[in-house]
Image: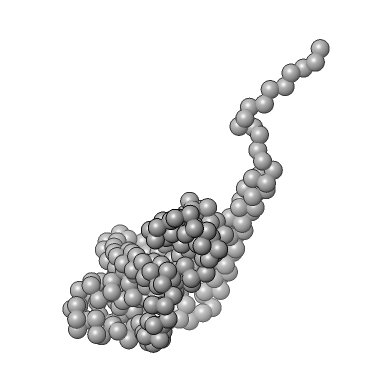
Amino acid sequence: MARSVFFDEGDIVDPSIARERRRRNFVLAGRIVVSVGLLLIWQLVSPHLDQLIFSSPADIVARLWEWSADGTLWSNLLVTAEELALGYVLGAALGIAFGLLLGSYPLVASILDPLLMAFYGVPKIAFGPLFIVWFGINMTPKVVIVGLMVFFFVFLSTYEGARTVDRDLLRAIRLMGATRLQERTLVIIPGSLPSILLGLKLAIPEALVGAIVGELIVSNRGIGYLLQFSASQLDSAGVFAGLFILMVLALLFNSAVNYASVKSGREDI
């Protein structure tokens, strides 16, 4: 008698999906092995290094635990995270808006191009003292510095994406009677999405630089303040602990952008 074989749909896996899953697991395992190996090497050689220059991973963990226990870590991390979030959202929103706008109007972009490039060429940190004069010594100048640094990366990337959208597709949709709004929502924005996501990703380290340098210029709170205070006390463990916190923040922001890329179907960004 012939035996019937029944397959549950959940048991059927596309070979390409299985290969991709194995690749991701291998990459994750490789990252863990490399990270742990580097930390072990660092810990082993740290007794032979000048402690004023290099602290051991154990000392850094101890400093993080100390800051966490007395609330120093969380109060300062909240300040820096708030500056980053507000400045990043502000700069990204303005960068996307202006990038799409000028990308849709090449003639206007040609007129404004020299002014934008001249402004872009000035180191954004140089505006820090001016922003402090304008906005005071509260959180606002740090948020503006972060927003300014994020703006240009997102703007230039978005502008390039909007400018290079398939013109044949635009002409075709115009022949079908599409309005300006429909051109933007149906062609320009979807066509610019990879460039927008790339700009958002490239702007993450710039946002961190803006927040930390702003705190170094004038602040008594934040991760930048902790770095400066630790350095003034010759506390290399505190400096490395602050750098570690910044790395975690960068990874979190980067993961958020990667998640948006996956959701938009642009996993390759």
Q: Position of residue 211 (x, y in %)?
A: 33, 73
Vertical position of residue 123 compared to residue 154: above or below: below
User: Disc count in the image?
Assistant: 0
Colour scheme in the image?
Answer: one colour
- Residue at image location 38% in from the left, 69% down from the top: 101
Residue furthest to the top: 1
Q: Position of residue 138 (x, y in %)?
A: 20, 74
- Indicate the quadrant where residue 32 lies: bottom right
- Residue at image location 24% in from the left, 85% down from the top: 130
Q: Position of residue 27 (x, y in %)?
A: 61, 56
Residue furthest to the right: 1
- What is the quadrant of the C terminus in the image? bottom right
Front residue (pair 266, 63) = 266
Front residue (pair 237, 224) = 224
Residue 11 in sight from this viewpoint: yes
Front residue (pair 58, 260) = 260
- Residue at image location 18% in from the left, 78% down from the top: 136
Vertical position of residue 189 compared to residue 147: above or below: above
- Residue at image location 81% in from the left, 12% down from the top: 1
Front residue (pair 26, 69) = 26
Report whether 83 appears left or right of 175: left
Residue 269 in sight from this viewpoint: no
Q: Position of residue 253 (x, y in %)?
A: 42, 62
